[in-house]
Amino acid sequence: MEFTVTESGEVVLRGMTSVPADHAWFWAEQWQEGERKAAAQIAAGHAEVYADAESMFADLDRSCRCDADIRHDSAVPPGSRAS
């Protein structure tokens, strides 16, 4: 605890919390910004709910393949793909 007495005589009490060194990354400003963005996306309904982990990973695999196809397609100049 930290106590401060102001010029007007007001006593200000600040609580202090100890954060283990291996948890400090979570409280970094950059990480907290990501947490705020994720919370806003969830609140806006931009989240998927899965029945189980298998369904989640299957969807993730499909998404990654789709993203890879998009990246690959954008690297191929128009008209150069064999039909």
Image (spheres, grey):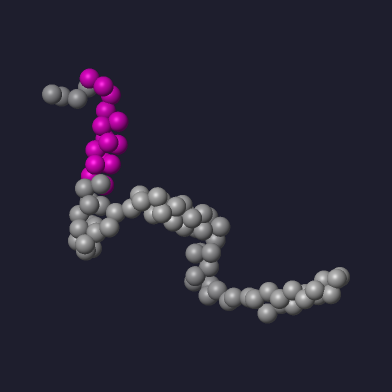
Between 75 and 5, the one lying in front of the other is: 5
Q: Tell me which corner region of the image, top left, top right, bottom left or bottom right, holds residue 51.
A: bottom left
Residue 65 % position (x, y):
23, 44
Q: Report how many numbered discs are placed on residues in the image.
A: 0
Residue depicted at x 44% and y 56%? 39
Q: Tell me which corner region of the image, top left, top right, bottom left or bottom right, holds residue 70.
A: top left
> Residue lying furthest right in this view?
7
Could you tell whether 54 is left or right of 77 in the image? left
Between 22 and 62, the one lying in front of the other is: 62
Between 1 and 63, the one lying in front of the other is: 1
The residue range painted magenta reads: 64-79
Q: Quadrant of the N terminus?
A: bottom right
Could you tell whether 10 is left or right of 30 in the image? right
Predominant SS of the magenta segment? helix
Q: Is residue 16 magenta?
A: no
Could you tell whether 33 is left or right of 71 in the image? right
Q: Quadrant of the C terminus?
A: top left
Residue 8 % position (x, y):
85, 71
**Residue 11 visible, this orientation:** yes
Q: Is residue 58 above or below residue 25?
A: above
> Residue lying furthest left in this view?
83
Residue depicted at x 30% and y 31%? 74
Residue depicted at x 65% and y 76%? 15
Residue 7 % position (x, y):
86, 70
**Residue 38 visible, this orientation:** no
> Residue lying furthest bottom in this view?
1
